[in-house]
Image (cartoon, helix red, strand yellow):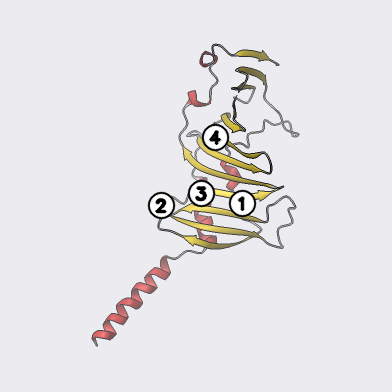
Amino acid sequence: MKHLRIFSVLAALLLGTAALAQTPEEIITNMDKEMSRYDEADGVVMTVDIKMPILGTMSSRTWTLGNKNRVEASAMGATIVTWDDGTTTWTYDGKNNEVTIEKSKINKDGIKDTSDGDLSMFNGITEGYDLSITKETDKAWYIRCRKNKSNTDKDAPKNMDIVVAKDSYYPLSLTASAGGMEITMKGISFGVKEEEVTFNQADFPNATVVDKR
């Protein structure tokens, strides 16, 4: 009877653990729900690393608040900082100590391109992919996304790897390979101050200013 009771307890524990287990699809669904709570009024920060053959890795950190953003990028020892408020773009070239002022770039639809740092890129990102959990720790799930036959987008990467935090369901990182490049988005956090996305000429008193507007 004693052994039977022990078996019953172990069975109950195993069933409870199984009930708590989540499929990769459920994890991504929960991630989408949490990301949808993001309020643009709070602002978001993220890092994007782009690994390219021969050229190496270019890393950028983006701060986005409403229609304003700031991007700090570094590659091959050079640092470029760009601010944009939807109308004007300021670019600081650290190597030449030069600030270039231009009108904001407009895409083919006549709309300001605000894709950098926009969390909407995560919406439905796994559609057309088969998901599997490749690794699990006490803090995160590691999910591999493999492109399936229903995905007819020629530009969609064949594989993506998403790491999702267990405590918040926020994506810790997303890595994809496309066009010979490996792109990783990581370090996502919320809360941006107005001064972090606003260009201030006083911060560059000795820089040469080139106004191309």
Mark number, residue 167? 2
Mark number, residue 171? 3
Q: Residues within 10 Å of mark 2 (few under 14, many from 20)?
A: few
Give the vertical position of 164 relative to 42 (above or below): below
Q: Are marks 3 and 1 in contact (CB under 8 Å)?
A: no
Residue where numbered disc 1 is placed: 125
What secondary structure is marked by label 3?
strand
Q: Separation of disc 3 and disc 1 at Cα? A: 12 Å
Residue 147 percent across, percent down from the top left: 67, 59
Q: Separation of disc 2 and disc 4 at Cα? A: 24 Å
Please state which amino acid type lies under the numbered disc 1. Ile
Please state which amino acid type lies under the numbered disc 4. Arg
**Quadrant including the N terminus:** bottom left
Q: Nearer the viewer, mark 4 or mark 3?
A: 4
Residue where numbered disc 4 is placed: 61
Q: Earlier in the sequence, mark 1 or mark 2?
A: 1
Q: Are marks 1 and 4 in contact (CB under 8 Å)?
A: no
Q: Earlier in the sequence, mark 2 or mark 4?
A: 4
What residue appears at the point 62 percent right and 45 percent down from the top-left corner? 183
Q: Earlier in the sequence, mark 4 or mark 3?
A: 4
Q: Separation of disc 1 and disc 2 at Cα? A: 21 Å
What residue appears at the point 31 percent right and 81 percent down from the top-left corner? 7
Q: Separation of disc 3 and disc 2 at Cα? A: 11 Å
